[in-house]
Amino acid sequence: MTACSFCGEEIKPGTGKLFVKKDGKLLYFCSNKCEKNLVVLGRKPRNVRWTKEFKEKKSAAKQ
């Protein structure tokens, strides 16, 4: 199983989307919500509250 490039959630086989950038980088998405936030809106996962990266950053700051 692969992880979503935006939220970090595991993607079950046969689901999700694969996005290929012009430079050849592969991005995996679990939902349209994740794809839109990264590709269209250009948001960083560390600044969006519901992503795994934000939660890890927040817990590291508390320690």
Image (cartoon, rainbow, N blue to C red):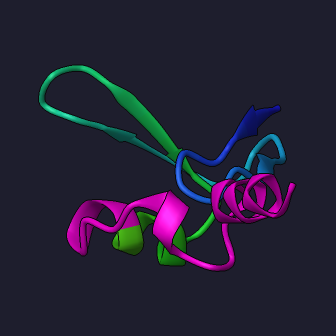
**Residue drawn at x 63%, y 54% as measured from the top left:** 16
Q: Position of residue 9 (x, y in %)?
A: 77, 54
Query: What is the residue that sits farthest to the top in this orientation?
Result: 24
**Residue drawn at x 53%, y 75% as measured from the top left:** 48
Please check the rendered image and state whether residue 49 is part of the magenta-colored stretch, yes or no. Answer: yes
Q: Which residues are magenta?
A: 38-63
On screen, 36 above or below 7?
A: below
In the displayed structure image, the side of residue 1 where residue 46 appears, left or right: left
Q: Position of residue 20 (x, y in %)?
A: 30, 34
On screen, 7 above or below 40?
A: above
On screen, 49 above or below 15?
A: below
Q: Quadrant of the N terminus?
A: top right
Count of numbered marks: 0
Where residue 14 sits, quadrant-wise, is top right
**Residue drawn at x 28%, y 60% as measured from the top left:** 39
Q: Quadrant of the C terminus?
A: bottom right
Query: What is the residue that sits farthest to the left in this orientation?
Result: 22
Where residue 57 sits, quadrant-wise, is bottom right
Q: Nearer the viewer, residue 57 or 5?
A: 57
In the displayed structure image, the side of residue 47 where residue 43 appears, left or right: left
Q: Position of residue 8 (x, y in %)?
A: 69, 50
Please check the rendered image and state whether residue 54 is part of the magenta-colored stretch, yes or no. Answer: yes
Where residue 22 sits, quadrant-wise, is top left
In the displayed structure image, the side of residue 2 where residue 49 appears, left or right: left
In the displayed structure image, the side of residue 20 where residue 30 appears, left or right: right
**Residue drawn at x 82%, y 64% as measured from the top left:** 62
Q: Magenta segment, principal secondary structure?
A: helix
